[in-house]
C-alpha cells in the first residue's frame, strides 16, 4: 500500500520545513487517486483539514511513518476522500461548513458544525451572511420498515454530560439504527488558533476537551517543537510523561466506575470515584492544577515536580493500587455485571481497522495500535511498552483494556519518578525566518490525538488543526449499538466515552 | 465482596469536611436572590446541569461533587435529570450559538422561582473563547445569572462553597 501512495506522489518534491513527516502538494487528480487507494485498505486516515485555498490529508500506511498530501482548492472544490474512505466524511462536512469548500463526489454534504445559528456561512472561507435556520431542521437518514419507531434524545441529556443529539430508530426494544448529530459545542477553535501567538493558541488547544487537556497540550507542544526543530529538556520530557499517564489513570478510573454504574453496579463507581479523586488531589498538590491544564508548554513544562511532590505521588499510588485490584477482582467475580458487559455493543474488528479506531475502543477490537509505541516519542520506550489488545470487541473488553492500561501507566509513573533527571524545565523557542510546519500525535486516554500547525516568523501560529480520537470513534458507536437494546445504549456509549467538545471544536 | 464489606465496617469515612460558604459568593448571591428565595426552599436545592459549550473540564469537577469524598447530597444539593424538577440551572461553557435554543428551552421548562448559576471562567465571562464568532457570550448574555462560580475549572470545593452560599441565603430569611 505504501508503494501505491509513494508511486502516486513520485516526482513531487516534499514541501520545505514540514517536520517530522513530509508534506506533498499534488494536483487534484493525484489527490483523488490517493483517496481511492485509501478506500482499498491498508492506509489509516490520520486527519483531513483545510486552510485558505488548500486541503490537507494526513495518512499513515500500516506500519510506516505518516505523511501529508495536500491539494489546492480549485473553484472552491477538491476531490472527496469520503467518497472512497468513509472515515473522512464527517471531517469533510466540517471543512465544508467552515470554509465552504465542496468535496466533489462526497456521499454526504449535510451540515455538520453549522446548525444554521451563526447568521453567516463559511466563517473561515468566503464568510457570507446566511439566513438563520431552525436548529431542528436537519434531514436525518430515512429508515424504512414495518413497526419502527424513532426515539430522539438530546442535545440536553439526563445527566451531567456534554450535549449531542441521538436519533434512535428502534424495532421494539432493538436498535435498528442510531444516527448522531453533533456540533452543539462548536466554539470556533479553528478560528481562535489562526494567526495568534503561540501562547494564546496553547491556551485554546488546552481547552478543546478538558479531560484530554494534557494530551492536547503535549501534542501541541511537540508539534511546535518539531516545526522549530528543537526538543524539550530531558527533565521536562519525563514530567510530561508523568502528567500524561496521570491523566490516563484518572480518566480510566472514572470510566471503569461509570461504565459499571450504567449497569447498576454502583459499588464500582463509588470506589473508582474515590480513587479518581485521590489521583486528582495528588495532581493538584504536585502540579498546582487537578487536571494539569496549561502545565505542558511549547519548549517544556511550566511546573516542576519537587521531591515532596514525587513522594506524595508515590504514596498515593501505593494506596490506590491494592484497593483498585480489589475492585477489579470484584468485577471479575460478579456474574451479574458481566452478564451486562459481555457480548454487549460489539465493535467488529474490520470496522475498527477501517476507521483507524484509536485507544481502548480500537484495542478492544483487535486493532494493535498505540501512538506511544507506534509513533514513539520521548519519554516512552516503545520496546518495553505493554500494549494490551483483546479481540472480543464488547463492553467487557473495553473495560479490561482500561484496567490493564491503568496498571501500565502506574508502573511508568513510578519508574520515571525514580530516575527523574536534573536540569532545566523549558527550552527557548528560536526565531525562524520562514514558515515551518509541525505535526505530532499523542496517545490521549481515548486514543491518538493529532495536532498539525504552522509557525510563522515572529512566533505566531498561522494555522492549527486538532483532531481528537473521537472523530473516528463516534461513527463506530453507531455501528456497535446496532441490534442491541435501547437500554444498553448508556452502557455502550460510556464504554466508548467519546468527546463531544473534542470533535465539535 | 465479603472482605470489602468487612473493611468498610472499620474504615473511617472518606468524606471531606464541609467547606465554609464562599464569602465572595455569599455576597454575590445576596443581592440577586434575597427577594426571590425567601421561604421557598428551606435547606435543599435541586440542580439541573447544562453544558452550553464547555470543554467538559467543568463537568468533570461537577461530577466529582457526587463522589463519596464530596457527597454534595449531605448539604441538600441534588442533581436531577429533568429541568421540571430543578430549582437551579447550573450552566457551563461559553454559550455557543448552536446550544442557545436548547439552553433557553431548558430554562423555560423549569418551574418558578428558579436560579441560574454560571460555572467556570467560560460560563462567567467566556474565558479563552471570548473573541469567537461561534459563541453568543457568557451565560449572562442568554439567561439572568444569579451566581457565578469562577475557575478553570473551579475545584469541587469552590463549587460546594458557592452552592452552600446559595443554600444559606435561601434558608437564612426563612
Image: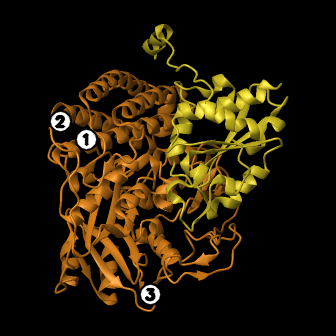
Chain colours: A orange, B yellow
Q: Nearer the viewer, residue A436 or A176?
A: A436
- Position of residue A166 in the picture relative to residue A224 (left or right): right
Which corner quadrant of the image does residue A292 belong to? Answer: top left
Q: Nearer the viewer, residue A198 or A284?
A: A198
Q: What residue does disc 2 label?
A: A420
Q: Is residue A42 visible?
A: no
Q: Residue at x 40, y 59 (%)?
A: A200
Neighbor class of circle 2 (other Cα within 10 Å; few <14, some 14-19, many 20+) is some
Q: Dividing the image into 4 quarters, which one contains the C terminus of chain B?
A: top right
Whole-percent x, y for residue A20 in the image: 20, 66
Q: Secondary structure at mark 1?
A: helix
Q: Which is nearer the N-term, disc 1 or disc 3?
A: 3
Neighbor class of circle 3 (other Cα within 10 Å; few <14, some 14-19, many 20+) is some
- Position of residue A324 in the picture relative to residue B34 (left or right): left
On screen, residue A137 above or below A237: below
Q: Chain of mark 2?
A: A
Q: Residue at x 81, y 26 (%)?
A: B173
Q: CA distance from mark 2 to mark 1?
A: 8 Å
Residue that extends furthest to the bottom in the rendered view of this protein: A75
Q: Secondary structure at mark 2?
A: loop
Q: Are marks 2 and 1 in contact (CB under 8 Å)?
A: yes
Q: What residue does disc 1 label?
A: A239
Q: Which is nearer the N-term, disc 2 or disc 3?
A: 3
Whole-percent x, y for residue A56 in the image: 34, 76
Q: Which mark is residue A77?
A: 3
Which corner quadrant of the image does residue A41 belong to? Answer: bottom left
Amino acid at each position: 500500500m505504501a508503494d501505491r501512495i509513494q508511486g502516486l506522489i513520485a516526482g513531487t518534491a516534499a514541501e520545505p520545513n514540514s517536520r517530522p513527516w513530509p508534506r506533498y502538494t499534488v494536483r487534484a487528480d493525484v489527490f483523488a487517486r490517493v483517496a481511492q487507494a485509501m478506500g482499498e485498505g491498508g492506509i489509516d486516515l490520520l486527519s483531513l483539514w483545510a486552510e485558505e485555498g488548500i486541503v490537507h490529508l494526513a495518512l499513515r500506511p500500516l506500519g510506516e511513518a505518516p505523511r501529508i498530501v495536500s491539494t489546492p482548492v480549485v473553484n472552491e472544490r477538491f476531490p472527496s476522500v469520503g467518497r472512497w474512505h468513509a472515515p473522512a466524511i464527517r471531517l469533510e462536512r466540517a471543512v465544508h461548513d467552515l470554509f465552504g469548500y465542496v468535496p466533489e463526489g462526497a456521499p454526504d454534504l449535510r451540515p455538520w458544525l453549522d446548525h444554521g445559528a451563526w447568521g453567516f456561512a463559511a466563517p473561515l472561507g468566503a464568510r457570507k451572511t446566511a439566513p438563520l435556520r431552525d436548529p431542528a431542521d436537519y434531514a436525518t437518514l430515512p429508515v424504512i420498515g414495518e413497526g419502527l419507531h424513532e426515539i430522539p434524545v438530546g442535545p440536553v441529556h439526563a445527566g451531567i454530560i456534554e450535549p449531542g443529539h441521538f436519533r434512535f430508530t428502534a424495532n421494539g426494544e432493538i436498535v435498528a439504527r442510531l444516527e448522531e448529530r453533533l456540533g452543539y459545542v462548536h466554539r470556533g477553535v479553528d478560528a481562535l488558533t489562526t494567526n495568534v501567538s503561540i501562547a494564546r493558541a496553547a491556551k485554546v488547544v488546552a481547552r478543546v476537551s478538558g479531560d484530554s487537556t494534557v494530551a492536547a497540550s503535549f501534542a501541541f507542544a511537540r508539534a511546535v517543537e518539531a516545526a522549530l526543530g528543537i526538543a524539550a529538556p530531558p527533565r521536562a520530557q519525563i514530567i510530561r510523561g508523568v502528567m500524561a499517564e496521570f491523566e490516563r489513570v484518572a480518566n480510566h478510573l472514572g470510566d471503569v466506575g461509570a461504565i459499571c454504574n450504567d449497569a447498576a453496579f454502583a459499588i464500582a463507581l463509588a470506589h473508582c470515584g474515590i480513587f479518581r479523586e485521590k489521583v486528582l488531589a495528588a495532581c493538584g498538590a504536585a502540579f498546582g492544577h487537578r487536571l494539569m491544564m496549561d502545565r505542558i508548554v511549547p519548549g517544556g513544562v511550566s511546573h516542576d515536580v519537587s521531591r515532596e511532590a514525587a513522594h506524595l505521588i508515590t504514596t498515593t499510588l501505593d494506596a490506590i493500587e491494592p484497593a483498585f485490584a480489589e475492585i477489579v477482582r470484584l468485577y471479575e467475580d460478579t456474574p451479574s455485571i458481566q452478564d451486562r458487559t459481555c457480548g454487549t455493543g460489539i465493535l467488529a474488528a474490520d470496522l475498527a481497522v477501517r476507521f483507524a479506531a484509536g485507544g481502548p475502543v480500537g484495542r478492544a477490537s483487535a486493532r494493535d495500535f498505540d501512538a506511544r509505541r507506534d509513533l514513539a516519542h520521548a519519554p516512552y520506550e516503545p520496546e518495553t511498552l505493554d500494549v494490551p489488545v483483546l479481540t472480543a470487541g464488547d463492553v467487557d473488553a473495553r473495560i479490561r483494556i482500561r484496567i490493564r492500561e491503568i496498571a501500565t501507566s502506574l508502573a511508568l509513573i513510578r519508574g520515571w519518578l525514580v530516575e527523574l533527571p536534573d536540569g532545566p524545565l523549558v527550552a527557548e523557542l528560536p526565531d525562524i525566518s520562514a514558515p515551518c510546519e509541525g505535526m505530532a500525535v499523542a496517545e490521549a486516554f481515548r486514543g491518538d490525538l493529532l495536532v498539525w500547525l504552522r509557525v510563522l516568523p515572529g512566533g505566531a501560529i498561522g494555522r492549527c488543526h486538532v483532531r481528537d480520537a473521537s472523530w473516528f470513534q463516534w461513527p463506530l458507536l453507531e455501528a456497535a449499538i446496532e441490534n442491541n437494546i435501547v437500554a444498553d445504549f448508556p452502557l455502550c456509549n460510556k464504554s466508548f466515552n467519546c468527546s463531544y467538545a473534542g470533535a465539535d471544536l | 465482596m465479603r472482605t470489602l464489606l468487612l473493611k468498610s465496617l472499620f474504615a473511617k469515612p472518606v468524606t471531606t469536611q464541609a467547606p465554609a460558604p464562599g464569602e465572595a459568593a455569599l455576597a454575590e448571591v445576596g443581592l440577586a436572590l434575597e427577594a426571590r428565595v425567601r421561604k421557598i426552599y428551606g435547606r435543599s436545592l435541586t440542580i439541573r446541569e447544562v453544558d452550553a459549550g464547555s470543554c467538559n473540564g467543568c463537568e468533570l469537577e461537577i461530577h466529582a461533587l457526587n463522589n463519596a469524598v464530596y457527597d454534595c447530597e449531605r448539604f441538600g444539593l441534588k442533581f436531577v435529570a429533568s429541568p421540571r424538577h430543578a430549582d437551579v440551572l447550573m450552566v457551563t461553557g461559553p454559550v455557543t450559538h448552536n446550544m442557545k435554543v436548547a439552553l433557553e428551552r431548558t430554562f423555560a421548562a423549569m418551574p418558578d422561582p428558579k436560579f441560574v448559576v454560571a460555572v467556570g471562567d467560560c460560563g462567567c465571562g467566556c474565558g479563552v473563547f471570548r473573541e469567537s464568532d461561534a459563541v453568543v457570550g457568557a451565560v449572562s448574555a442568554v439567561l439572568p445569572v444569579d451566581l457565578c462560580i469562577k475557575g478553570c475549572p473551579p475545584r469541587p470545593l469552590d463549587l460546594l462553597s458557592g452552592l452552600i452560599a446559595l443554600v444559606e441565603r435561601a434558608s437564612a430569611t426563612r
